[in-house]
């Protein structure tokens, strides 16, 4: 129903400055003349979990759920012909859900839905006030920042010839990219010649530094390995790097720490998994940043993902202990102080399941008056 999209978009718009959007405001923002139609839409949307009532609220209102935000983003991707259908979920991270999707020509792609704030609000106690004012807006806003950051970095890296997926689209908290036909390094149990891949991965870390960047989460889950058969009967292992929301600039105060951590991650993994240790020390941050030939970190700042946004996202990630998906020794120490049992407060992705292997409903183009809602003002 066209009205449903308008009402959903109205709930989204209202969510920017209301944790609970008052029902009269939804009516107003929807721009629909018939209050009755809006109320009918509201009850439809609430029934399928795209908006939700808050318990014990002081006034009558609704908040947009993750499911609702998903629908809005998918709706925009289908309208722009970026996505035609959504298929199986292939990954569940702490801060994201990954789906296979396809465009109109049937080309397989990946839809990454960022979900910051879904897991534990570990430091929630220290930030009660901050959350009281911002919680609903903040998961939406921060997830969108993560998606924007990932998309901008993927574009810059791809332009620069790095082995990353092709960025195809971004809307709200979602990124669409090419599907890499490969498995995470994590799933490769044996390698004929670990030294070659090891050298290539470390040289990628150095090449990144030479354009001003540190991946920040360079681990066996974020390196996809394609096995290409070669003439000599062996297989060449081609890496593709993914997962960019935590990338940092070489001019970050802790840049060297992050650089070393990425290097150590590979060293430790090759040692543990493939019994391979290199005799050569390094690479070292200082050497790698001697000949910086380009500043992609600066270029990205000048894109849609501003310095201010980068700061907000970094602060949020730090506050919530978001620090990559493999974790490590460094992380465990920070984990100690604030592990309160707050699981009840987490933001559940209320669940409208995405349709599996069926085309998304094609909706007429005229419904949501404009997609200005796609990029909430900040
Ligand atoms: P998270 O932030 O949750 O770690 P990732 O971007 O690392 O999300 O993706 C999680 C998993 O999904 C990866 O380990 C990989 O298996 C799969 N994946 C993500 N992007 C792609 C892609 N473009 N092609 C193929 N698989 C992918
Ligand atoms: Mg990952």
Image (tube, rainbow, N blue to C red):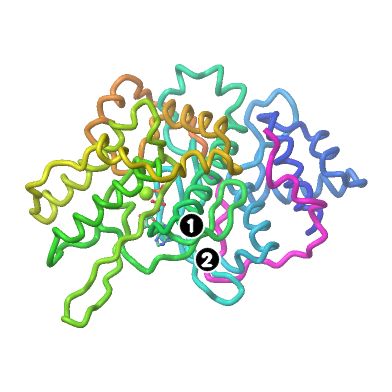
Which residue matches tag 1?
A: 159
Residue at 10% from the left image edge and 49% from the top image edge? 278
Q: Name the residue nearer the viewer: 181 or 157.
A: 157
367 with respect to 116 (left or right):
right
Residue at 70% from the left image edge and 62% from the top image edge? 79
Which residue matches tag 2?
A: 101
155 with respect to 342 (left or right):
right
Residue at 19% from the left image edge and 55% from the top image edge? 198
26 with respect to 209 (left or right):
right
Residue 100 screen position, x and y as percent: 48, 64
Residue at 22% from the left image edge and 33% from the top image edge? 329
Residue 25 screen position, x and y as percent: 81, 34
Quadrant occupied by the C terminus? top right
Residue 231 position (above or below residue 10) = below
Residue 143: quadrant of the picture = top right
Residue 333: quadrant of the picture = top left
Q: Which residues are magenta?
A: 349-378
Q: Nearer the viewer, mark 2 or mark 1?
A: 1
Q: Alpha-carbon neighbours of circle 2 within 10 Å: few (<14), some, or many (≥20)?
A: many
């Amino acid at each position: 129903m066209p009205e449903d999209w308008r009402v959903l978009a109205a709930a989204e718009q209202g969510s920017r400055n209301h944790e609970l959007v008052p029902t009269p405001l939804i009516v107003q923002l929807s721009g629909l003349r018939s209050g009755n139609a809006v109320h009918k839409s509201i009850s439809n949307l609430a029934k399928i979990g795209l908006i939700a009532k808050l318990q014990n609220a002081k006034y009558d209102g609704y908040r947009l759920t993750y499911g609702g935000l998903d629908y809005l983003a998918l709706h925009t991707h289908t309208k722009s012909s970026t996505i035609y259908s959504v298929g199986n979920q292939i990954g569940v991270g702490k801060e994201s859900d990954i789906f296979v999707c396809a465009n109109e020509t049937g080309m397989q792609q990946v839809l990454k839905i960022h979900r910051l704030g879904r897991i534990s609000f570990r430091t929630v106690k220290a930030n009660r006030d901050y959350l009281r004012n911002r919680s609903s807006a903040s998961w939406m806003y921060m997830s969108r920042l993560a998606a924007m950051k990932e998309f901008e970095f993927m574009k810059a890296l791809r332009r620069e010839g790095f082995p990353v997926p092709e960025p195809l689209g971004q809307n709200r908290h979602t990124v669409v990219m090419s599907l890499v036909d490969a498995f995470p390094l994590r799933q490769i149990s044996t390698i004929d010649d670990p030294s070659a891949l090891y050298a290539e991965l470390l040289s990628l870390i150095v090449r990144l530094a030479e354009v001003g960047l540190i991946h920040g989460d360079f681990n066996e889950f974020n390196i996809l390995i394609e096995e290409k058969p070669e003439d000599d009967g062996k297989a060449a292992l081609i890496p593709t790097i993914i997962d960019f929301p935590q990338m940092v600039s070489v001019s970050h105060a802790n840049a060297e720490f992050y650089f070393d951590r990425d290097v150590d991650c590979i060293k430790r993994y090759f040692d543990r998994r493939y019994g391979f240790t290199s005799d050569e020390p390094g690479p070292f941050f200082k050497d790698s940043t001697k000949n910086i030939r380009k500043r992609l970190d600066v270029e990205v700042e000048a894109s849609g993902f501003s310095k201010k946004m980068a700061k907000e996202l970094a602060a949020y990630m730090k506050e919530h202990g978001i620090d990559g998906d493999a974790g490590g020794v460094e992380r465990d120490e920070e984990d100690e102080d604030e592990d309160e049992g707050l699981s009840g407060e987490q933001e559940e992705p209320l669940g409208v399941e995405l349709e599996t292997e069926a085309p998304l409903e094609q909706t007429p183009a005229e419904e949501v008056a404009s997609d200005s809602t796609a990029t909430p003002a900040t």
